[in-house]
Image (cartoon, rainbow, N blue to C red):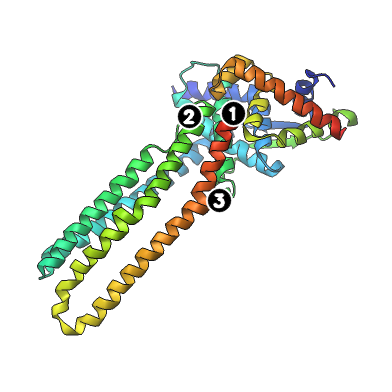
Amino acid sequence: MIEDELIKIWQSSSNQERVKFEKSKLMIELKSSLGRLHRWWKYLELVEVISIIIGILSFAYLVFWVPFTTTKVACVLIIILGVTTLIKLLGIKKIKPSDLEENYLEYLKRTKAYLQAQKKLLETYVYWAVLPIFPIMLLFLVGFWEIPEKRFVIVVTYLATIGIGIYAYFLNKKRIKNEIDPRIDKVEEMIEELKS
Amino acid sequence: MKKEQETIFLSALESNREKLFRICSIYAKDDEDAKDLFQEVLVHVWRSMSTFKGNSAIGTWMFRVALNVCLRFKSKHTKNQNRFIRLDSITVANFGSIENSEKENEKLNSLRKCVKDLNQADKAIVSLYLEGIAYKEIASILGLSENHIAVKIKRIKSKLLNCINKIL
């Protein structure tokens, strides 16, 4: 078989498979599909923003409502932590490769950078989110210690916070190992294959 | 403006539909997958139409978008199957061996199998080469130099010929 025959054979598949479309119907479907997608993205963004605003407002309300100074300080710190998390998440979103018109190599490089940023965020999550929440929660609960009947609840709540923190740490480790690392390896392999 | 975009899109699709479908079929695991991926590609091509600046031929631009969609699909394949969009206006008709001789079909199936066995990067290059796209355009779509593409295509062709000869 001669080399040029490859192209001929490949293109002969047009005799086997033919793509047909109705122009007007296709345009209607494409427009409505995109409309649905946009609405879905807007909905997701709205849910995220509303949940964060509700969280911030709840703690802001607690700042005025609770009588204990330590709890007030903790509420402010939780709000700051929430805003920091939001900023970090938005920062990651910014580098998400969305431009499909870039060349293949550039698209792969951007995908790799995005995945590495995600990995770094999850790896460092324990330092900027999990560890700070422990002293903040202690500060939050310590004011209520003055009420003897609340002490058991305080201990349980704090232990639960520690448990959730440890669970979040291992969950992130698992996500990195099972989801992100294999994708980074795959993208790196593709970049290498292209360059070799 | 929208109407003009629509006309450009439909006419480019008219002349490139089979080519785009074949590119999708390289990345798909079966025929159904290829149809799903083709629909996904069309939605993304239409979505990006407003940013098409005419710096390259519309066909070249479409292949670029298609390859990146295929890549995205491939890396998320197991997770997001349910996110595909259904476009009823698109049909892919299989004519089987009506127009091709048995020998030709055998060759085509072997070639398809061999292409699927290539690594991801070689698949991207060969999918464009087999569509008869010039080296210069392939280089621009993939972000590599023309010389690099020429060397790689030579290597891939030899791999493919070896593979096909083993099967036939």
Query: Which residue is at the front of the view, B36 or B151?
Result: B151
Q: Which residue is mark 2?
A: B48
The x, y position of residue B100, in whole percent, is 85, 28
Q: CA distance from mark 2 to mark 3?
A: 24 Å
Q: Residue at x 89, y 29 (%)?
A: B103
The x, y position of residue B95, in whole percent, is 80, 34
Q: Residue at x 63, y 32 (%)?
A: A22
Q: Dividing the picture into quarters, in which one does residue B123 lie? A: top right
The x, y position of residue A80, in whole percent, is 21, 53
Q: Chain letter for mark 1, please.
A: A
Question: Badge 3: few (under 14), some or many (20 or more) residues near its Cα, within 10 Å?
Answer: few
Q: Residue at x 47, y 22 (%)?
A: B52
Verify CB contact (< 8 Å) between mark 2 and mark 1.
no
- Amino acid tagged 1: Leu
Q: Secondary structure at mark 3?
A: loop
Query: Do the residues indicated by labels 2 and 1 lie within the same chain of the protein?
Result: no
Q: Chain letter for mark 2, please.
A: B
Marks 3 and 1: which is nearer the front? 1
Q: Is residue A73 visible?
A: yes
Residue A75's place in the image compared with B59, above or below, is below
Q: CA distance from mark 3 to mark 1?
A: 25 Å
- Amino acid tagged 2: Ser
Query: Which residue is at the front of the view, B41 or A3?
Result: A3
Residue B145 lies left or right of residue B105; in this view the side is left
Quarter of the figure that contains the N terminus of chain A: top right
Identify the mark at residue A63; answer none if there is no mark.
none
Residue A147 lies left or right of residue B150; in this view the side is left
Q: Chain letter for mark 3, please.
A: B
- Amino acid tagged 3: Lys
Q: Which residue is mark 3?
A: B79
Q: Secondary structure at mark 2?
A: helix
